[in-house]
Image (cartoon, rainbow, N blue to C red):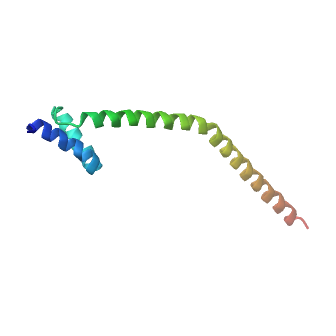
């Protein structure tokens, strides 16, 4: 027979598989109120590890992509400047008799 604590803890674990959003709302409430025995500690730890890995990948990806984004931005500015120069040069010729 399950104790009340085991039942509550298994409810938290069950929520993880059945309704993740509700799980994300329920477990912080348990932790904030000090009901650690009722919280789904294993899945919470897993989610924290996953967040760290995801953040690390995002930082690495941003660092790798930053030089490319700067180069693309510089090319776009150069293209715009050339187009503006071509337009102003053409206007000068049209204005002459």
Which residue of the protein is positioned furthest toward the right in this rendering?
97
Q: Quadrant of the N terminus?
A: top left
Residue at image x 63%, y 42%?
Answer: 69
Residue at image x 47%, y 33%?
Answer: 56
Relative to 95, 63 lies left or right: left
How far from the left and from the top, in percent, is residue 21? 28, 49
Choose between 70 and 45: the one closer to the eye. 45
Q: Quadrant of residue 68?
A: top right
Q: Quadrant of the C terminus?
A: bottom right
How far from the left and from the top, in percent, is residue 83? 76, 56
How far from the left and from the top, in percent, is residue 18? 26, 51
Relative to 83, 21 lies left or right: left
Relative to 65, 46 lies left or right: left
Q: Is residue 25 above or below residue 51?
A: below
Which residue of the protein is positioned furthest toward the front in this rendering?
1
Q: Is residue 52 above or below residue 20?
A: above
How far from the left and from the top, in percent, is residue 3? 8, 37
Which residue of the protein is positioned furthest toward the bottom in this rendering?
97
Residue at image x 81%, y 62%?
Answer: 91
Q: Quadrant of residue 11?
A: top left
């Amino acid at each position: 027979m399950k104790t009340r604590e085991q039942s509550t803890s298994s409810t938290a674990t069950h929520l993880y598989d059945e309704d993740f959003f509700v799980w994300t709302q329920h477990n912080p409430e348990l932790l904030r109120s000090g009901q650690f025995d009722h919280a789904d500690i294993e899945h919470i730890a897993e989610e924290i590890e996953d967040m760290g890995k995801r953040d690390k990948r995002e930082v690495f990806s941003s660092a790798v992509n930053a030089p490319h984004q700067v180069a693309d931005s510089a090319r776009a500015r150069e293209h715009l400047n050339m187009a503006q120069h071509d337009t102003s040069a053409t206007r000068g010729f049209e204005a002459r008799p």
